[in-house]
Structures are given as C-alpha cells and as structure tokens.
Image (spheres, grey):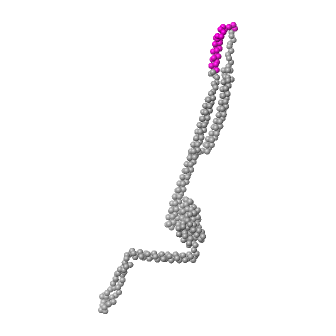
Amino acid sequence: MMPNPGKMLGLQAQVRHNAAEISEYFSDLGKWEEEVKAKDKAILKGDLNPASGKKKATPGVRQKGFVEMVPSGVLGPKDKERKKKKKGDDDDDEETRIKPKNYQDYNQWDQFVHKDLDKMLEDFDENDRQEQEEGHRNRLAEERRKIDEQERLARAHVEEAERLKNLGNDLLKSGDLEGARNMYGRAIETDEKNHVPFANRAQVYLKLEMYEDAIKDCDSALAIDPRYVKALMRRGTAKEATGDKAGAIADLKKAVMLEPSNKQAKDHIKALSMTDEEKAEAERAKEEEEKRKAAIAEKEAKEKRKKERGGKKLMVREASDTPATRAGDADPTTRPARVKIVEQEEA
C-alpha cells in the first residue's frame, strides 16, 4: 500500500493544530490555576468569606415597660436564643464556605494531563512510524516485483532469440540463404544484445556476395563482443572482397592474437601478404599437392580391393596348337582343340 501524500500532509497539519490547541489549553489552565490559588489565599484571610459579609441580626425593639429579670451572669431566654441562632449561622457558614484546594490536586491533574498528552503523542509517533515502515516495505515489494518481471521478460526474449538463431542455422545448413537471413533478423529484433545472430547473418551476406552488409553486421557483433573471433574473420573476408586488403589483414591479425592456434586465420594472412608471383607459385604447389594426394588415395584404394578378394587370383590363358601335326590328319575335327588352362597366381 503506497502512502497518500495528501493524507500525510493533512495529518501533519492536524498535529500542528492539536499542538497549538493544547498549548493554548495549558496556558488557560495555568491562568485559572493562579486565579484559584489567589482566591484560596483570600478566603483563608477572610476577605472573601461569605459569612463575613452577613449582617448580624439586630434585636427587636423591646416593648415599653418590659423588664427582663435575670440574675447577673446567667443567660436569659433571649441570650440563649441569640446564642442558638449564632451557632446555626456558623454552621451555615461552614457549609457555604469555599474550601481551599490542596496543591497536590493540581499536581495530580498536571501529571494526568501531561501523561495523557505524552501517551497520545507517543501513539501518534508509533502509528506514523508503522505507516512509514509499511509504505517502505510496500515500495520495496513493488520494486522487487518490477525487477522480477523485467528479468522474466528478458529471459523469455533470450530464449526466443536463441530458438530463432538455431532455426536460422538449420536453414543455412540446408542452403536456404533467404530463410536464414530472415530468421537471423527476427532473432536480432528479439534480442539486440546477442552478438551471434549478427555474425551469422554476416556469413549469409558473404555467401550472397553482399559484402557491405556483411561488414555492418560484423561491426554490430564486435560492438557487443569485441573478442568474437568469427566476426573478425568474416569481416576480414568481406574487406578482402571489397579491396580493403590492409583492413582484412588487421582483422585477421586480431583474430590470431585472440586465438593463437587459429590456423585458418594464419593461412589467410599469409595468402594476403603474398605477391602475385608468390600466389601463382603457391597455386601450382597446391595443385601438385592435390594431385599427389589423389594418386596416393587411388593406390590405397586399389590395395584395399586386392585384400578384399583374397591372396590369389585366377588367370585364364589359351594354349597354342600342338607343333607336331601329322600330314595324314586331314580331318580338322581330329586336330587337338585349343584348351583353356586355368592357373592360380599369387596376387
């Protein structure tokens, strides 16, 4: 789940607004606390005691001629009534008097408010941290999913390009040059980072005598893998066909540097380095060598056939007439006939 930037901004604004309200609340609470403490002090002094503001009840006007006869020092009926009334007023004063607050109550309230606020802020920070971690995990999971999907597609492209390249190889072996060229082209379109289809299509262009196209494909293959020897050799062959003898030799020398045992490249360099007379002499020597090899092969084949027939062979010969022919033998039917003599000779 991706975090919503608008939601995050709204939460931050709400936190700032809550913090401002809480600060204003504590400011008012402090003022109220100071006012209450001041009133408590005034009440303790009696300045604000409601009972102190009450006027004492004045006795009624005594009736004319009434004399209260009570012993000195003894409370009379009216004195008892006044005392009782005064005691009731004192009880009312106790009930109506504002009792001062204990300062521990304010400390407990402050601790409760601060503790609750700190817990609220901690919970908010914890929720915000969890949301950020969840958003980070979700982003990582999404990036990982995208990477896996890209790798899967890349593998699919590579496998498809390899399949098309192999089809092109089969068509090239069968002699279908146009089909091979098209198949190599599709392999290149599927995976442009594979250098082999470029070099193989260059081979097709060499057979089609399209040397410039062969050079371009070899350039593309070597741009991907500069150490690909087949591309160097095919480009050298194409350059030779276009008359760039020096460029051909340079490519072949690079091939020999990468593969010192490459006899084909060495022979090609030697052939390109010869003069016309040396080439003619080499051609004659080559023809003579081929004739010599052909004679040896023919002789070996003849010997093989003899061995297959066995150690001896049959020879058929005709015998001549007998030298002593009698004169009286006039009948030719009585003459000895030519006989066939079969002999065996060792092979």
Q: Is residue 172 left or right of residue 102?
A: left
Q: Could you say which is closer to the camera, residue 176 or residue 41?
A: 41
Above or below for 105 versus 241: above
Any magenta on residue 79? yes
Above or below for 274 versus 73: below
The answer to whether residue 201 of the structure is visible from this angle is no
- Residue, x 63% and y 37% (percent of image)? 18
Work out which quarter of the rendered image holds the N terminus and state it.
Answer: top right
Any magenta on residue 247? no
Work out which quarter of the rendered image holds the C terminus and state it.
Answer: bottom left
Residue 147: percent from left, percent from top:
55, 52
- Residue, x 60% and y 38% (percent of image)? 121
- Quarter of the image for residue 54 reads top right
For the view shown, which residue lies furthest in the front direction? 73
- Residue, x 64% and y 36% (percent of image)? 22
Residue 23: percent from left, percent from top:
65, 36
- Quarter of the image for residue 312 reads bottom left
Magenta extent = 64-93
Q: Is residue 61 left or right of residue 256?
A: right
